[in-house]
Image: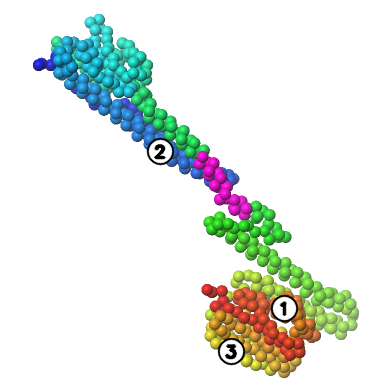
Amino acid sequence: MTDVFATQETAAPGSTSDDDGTSPRRSRRPRGTRIPARVQIMGWLVLVMTAGLATVVLLVAEFEYRAIDERVNSGLAQDAQEFRRFADAGTDPATGQAVADPYDLFFRHLSSQYPDRAEIMLGIEETAGGGLDAVQQSDEALRDVTFDDPLLRRIVEAPRTTGTVETPAGELRWLRVDVLPREGGSEPNAWFVSGYVIDEARSDAADTVRTLVIISAIALVLAAGVSWVVAGQILAPVNTVRKAAARLTEADLTRRIRVEGRDDVAALADQFNAMLDRLERAFATRRQFLDDAGHELRTPITIVRGHLELMGDDPAERAEVVRLCTDELDRMARIVDDLLLLAKAEQPDFVRPEWTSVPELTSDIDAKVRAIAPRSWTLEAIGEGEAYVDAQRVTQAVVQLAQNAVQHTEDGASIRIGSSVDERSVSFWVTDTGPGLAPGDEERIFDRFVRGEAGARGGTGAGLGLAIVKAIAVAHHGDVRVLSAPGHGATFGFELPLRGGQA
C-alpha cells in the first residue's frame, strides 16, 4: 500500500534553557574581632553546614531537573517517532481502515495515546479559510488549557521544529512534525505537536528540593543549638581560667582551677595551675626575702646609726666608730649575699647537675676546708662512684657546714668530713666536737635566722648558713640531717639522689 501522508525529518529535541552563573563574593572578617569564641565556634559550624547543605540541595536539584529534562526530551522524540510510523502506515491499526485526511489522522492517533504527566499532544490543520484547527489530547490536569490561533501559529511557523512557548499553563517545551499535503507539495498544511509543560513536569522535583531546604533549615537550627551548648561546655574551663586570672592579686594566689578530663582544655587548666604555683612561689620568695632583709638588717642599721649619733670629736673615738660601722656594713653585705642566694635557690637553674666523681669531689672539698681555720681536720670516709650533682653547689654546702663547725669549736679541735655512696644516694657530712645542740633544736636548726641555743654563745653568723645548705639539698631533690648530743658535738650532713632528677 502506498503512503498517504509524508513527514519531514525533525531536529532532535533539546533543552533551550540557559544556566545563569554567579560570581563568588569574598567576605572579609574584621581584624581584631571581639566576637566571643563561643559565638565564633557556632558561627563557623553553621557556616560550614550551610555550605555543605546548600551544595547537597543544589546537586539534588540539578540531578532532578536534568533527569526531568532527559525524560521530556525522550518523550518528545518517542511521540514524534510513533506519529511518523502511524502516518507512514496510512491505516488505523485497530480497524485496518485507511486514514482519509489530516484531521482523521490526528483524531485516530491521539485517541490511542495516553499522555504522560504534564504532556500535551496537538494535531493542527490549516482550514480552507486560512485558520488553524486543532485536536488536543493532554494530561488530566491540563485538559482546560486552550491554544488560540496566535499561539498555534507561533508553533507551526517557527523556523525550528523544537522550541519553547509560553502558554496559560506555563512554559511549554514542544516538538513539531510537519505533515505534507496528500495531493503533493513542499509546504506542510498540518502539524503534529507534542509538548510538556515544564513547570508541571518539574513539580515533583521542586517539591523534593523544597523539602530538602526545609529539612536543611531545621538541621541548621538544631546544629546551632547543639554547637552553642557543646561550645559552652568545651570553653567552660577557658572561662574559668579567664575569671581566675581576673581575680588573681598579689595578696591571693591560692585559687586553683579544678581539672577534669584529659583533653587540651584540661591540659590548659593544668598548665595554668602550674603557672600559679610558680607565681605563688615567686611571690612567697620575694616576701620572704623582704621580710628576712628587714628583720636581719634592722639591727646593724640601728647599731651604725647609734654610733654615728653618739660619735664625739675625739679622733680615737672616731676611728673606733668607723671600725665598728665598717664591721657592721660588712656583716650587712654578707647577709644580703646570703639572702640573695636563698632567693635564687627557688629558681630552676639554681643547680646545674652533671655526672661527677665523688672521690675527686670529696678530696677537693677536704683541701678547701683545711684553709678555713686551724683545726684538726680529718677525712674519715670517701664514697666511690659517680653522682649526678652540681659539684660547685655541693662544695658550697659542705664548706658552709665546715664554717659552722669552726664557729662552734676552739683552735685545734677535731673536725671530720666524709662522703658515702650507696645504690640510690650520695651523702656528705661534717662532724665537730663542739657543744652540740640543745634538745628540740634539731627540727628547726636549718630554718632561716635560727641559731642553736648551745651554739649561740659566741657565734657571729646571722643564722643563714644552714638554711643555704638545706636550699642546696632541696634543689637536688635531697634532704638534710643532723645528729647531736648536748656537750658531745654534732654531725650535720645532707643526702642527695645518686641520679638527681633523672629517671
Q: Residues within 10 Å of mark 2 (few under 14, many from 20)?
A: some
Residue range highlighted in magenta: 222-241
Provide the residue designation for mark 3: 382
Q: Earlier in the sequence, mark 3 or mark 2?
A: 2
Q: Earlier in the sequence, mark 3 or mark 1?
A: 3
Q: Amino acid at mark 2?
A: Val
Of tags 3 and 1, the one toward the viewer is 1
Confirm or deny contact between disc 2 and disc 1 (CB under 8 A): no
Q: Quadrant of the N terminus?
A: top left
Q: Is residue 31 visible?
A: no
Q: Is residue 449 magenta?
A: no
Confirm or deny contact between disc 3 and disc 2 (CB under 8 A): no
- Judging depth in this view, the residue of 179 and 112 nearest the camera is 112
Q: Is residue 238 magenta?
A: yes
Provide the residue designation for mark 2: 56
Provide the residue designation for mark 1: 443
Name the residue located 53 percent from the left edge and 80 percent from the top edge: 355
Q: Secondary structure at mark 1?
A: loop
Residue 188 in the image, given as x and y percentages of width and height? 20, 14
